[in-house]
Amino acid sequence: MASSIETFGLTKRFGSFTALDHLNLKVEGSKCVGFLGPNGAGKTTTLKLLTDMIFPTEGGCRINGVSVQDDRKRALADAGVLIESPEIYPSLTPNEALGMVADLRGLAASDRRDRIRTVLGEVKMSDWADQKVGRMSKGMKQRINIASALVHDPAVLLLDEPSTGLDPRGMAEVRAIVRDLKQSHRLIFMSSHILSEVVDVCDEVALIDKGKLLFYDTLENVTARFANGHSTVDVLLARPITPEDVARRVTPLPSVAGVQQLDPKRLRVRFTGGLDGQEHLVEALVGLHLGVVSVAESESALEEIYLSQISRGD
Amino acid sequence: MASATVDAPAGRLQVPGSMQQVLKLTRYQLREYIRSRRFVALAAIVLVIGAILTAVVAHFRGAVISTNLAYYGTFWGGGVVFVIVLAAVFFGGDAIAGEFQNKTGYFLMGLPMRRATVYVGKFIAAFVASVAMMLLFLAILVGNGAYYFGVNLLPWQIWLSLVLALLYLAAVLGATFLFSSLFKVSAYGFVLTALLFLIGFSLIQDVVTMLVKIEPWMIISYADSTIGEVFSTNVLWGLTGTVTQSTIGMGPHAVTTTTYTAGVGEGIVIMLVYLVVTAAAGLWLFEREEFT
């Protein structure tokens, strides 16, 4: 059976404030779904409802077909959870904290030590395995939290802004961990407001604002749907180029719909034709001998969609 | 509480039964208590109380320890109640509220456990840690008792008194956990428990006894007197207590005071009712509290 997360009519009100408004969402299979939205959109509320930390006003949710509200124990049995950067009992070491999680989850004693060693290695905390958690920085604790979500090798991962509190290197490492996890047939549901993170690691994206789901689709479909068939790439040049040269040489290229000069050495090019169009564009740019160093898919596409959809609701 | 194991939907893991999880959680929670400063601090307080008690007994000797029963009745019966309240405040005051305030609850709540498992596991851990303090206090008293009366004169009543003290501890912890479940700030749980058990209940008991002139059977502190009362030669074992009236002064200024002493059976019932009601109410609250 494919792993799945499902919400049906999921609603949460705090007094007169509606934090989540009849959320209907079903994600299943082995993929990473980015759950995007501005602060206060209802992302963490959704994840807390999915883990029974708070209770729905209406509706409900299921993990792997098991109702979280009716049987949290069975619903969370094969899920790894990281919500709100939790604190670990300060007197425990990472080895002990993960041992407790493994023990309570029913990991066989024979597998426990190897598994803990593996996940501590994955989050780069092996050298701290026997130090007290209470003496660790916020970023180190977050790594232990990620390790605790992984220790039982879950089929479903619920991650609430997992890179919160980490330095840039830590954030990059978390992304690498999530990318690796995608390879091993898991369903990852990850909330974030960092667009580059979502573009980098997610296959699909769900956008939520003011408690309502605005859309849920693959990144490609979202980009295609909201960008009117346009794609965007960022082009890095070895040498500066003048605005006149951009207008004279780049803008007229076939399939180019628009060019924005970000700085003297960086261009953002909107074009049509999908992957074929991108291939022709790269060939043409190289043929112009502008000193093209790199052509990368722009994060701005999702950013523009994000901003347009969020502002539409204002 | 069901104790059957739960198959993960994918069939890869068997989550332990709830009873097994309670015991596992108790073990880790107890480890947390034992390594904490509060455990060391409370042990130090108990040792200081024991040292003061040893000095008092050595100084006044015959005046306060005429018999071994009087010795244990006075010092164990009076002292252990204080130790129990302190232990409940130290280990139970923030047991539930702390999970919210310190955000450790978010770590536990992501695990496949029933909420009752968390509540019961923490309760047992607090109970065991408190029993350790009680036994430390008892060891000091028995040491003194052995010195003055010999090791063979440990009265059998001490075991009954110990059972009553354990029951009182469970009842106090039940109330402490209930208070802790009412708040999401640890300090409120600490303060409310300490105030009620060190001052509040005694005050209410005095008011009920002196002003209303009825037996204060509804106050838990009324039941704790049975812990020392079992050493008394005229102890009442049943469900009714004794009423003693004494008059102070003479003539129109004479004041008559009434003292109620709970029967042992009555004390047991009061403590059991407190334990069951507060534990059920605390668990009910915790089951409905949200980790917002």
Image (cartoon, coloured by chain):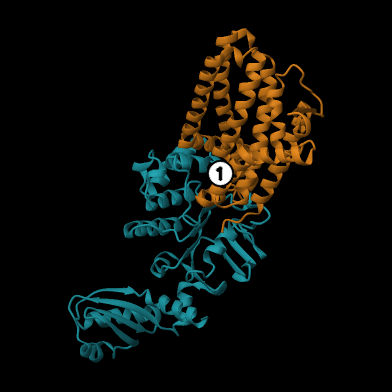
Q: Is residue A66 above or below residue A239?
A: above
Q: Is residue B120 visible?
A: no
Locate residue B145: give its quadrant: top right
Residue at the image point whose x is 80% and y is 38% from the top: B214
Locate residue B170: give its quadrant: top right
Circle 1: residue type? Arg
Residue at the image point whose x is 66% and y is 57% from the top: A69
Between A9 and A155, the one nearer to me in the picture: A9
Q: Is residue B59 left or right of residue A14?
A: left
Q: Is residue A25 above or below residue A253?
A: above
| Residue at disc 1, secondary structure | helix
Q: Is residue A52 above or below residue B147?
A: below
> Residue A48: x, y in percent?
56, 59
Q: Chain of mark 1?
A: A
> Residue A279: x, y in percent?
33, 78
Residue matched to label 1: A105
Q: Is residue B108 left or right of residue A162?
A: right
Residue at the image point whose x is 40% and y is 51% from the top: A143
Chain A tint as drawn: cyan
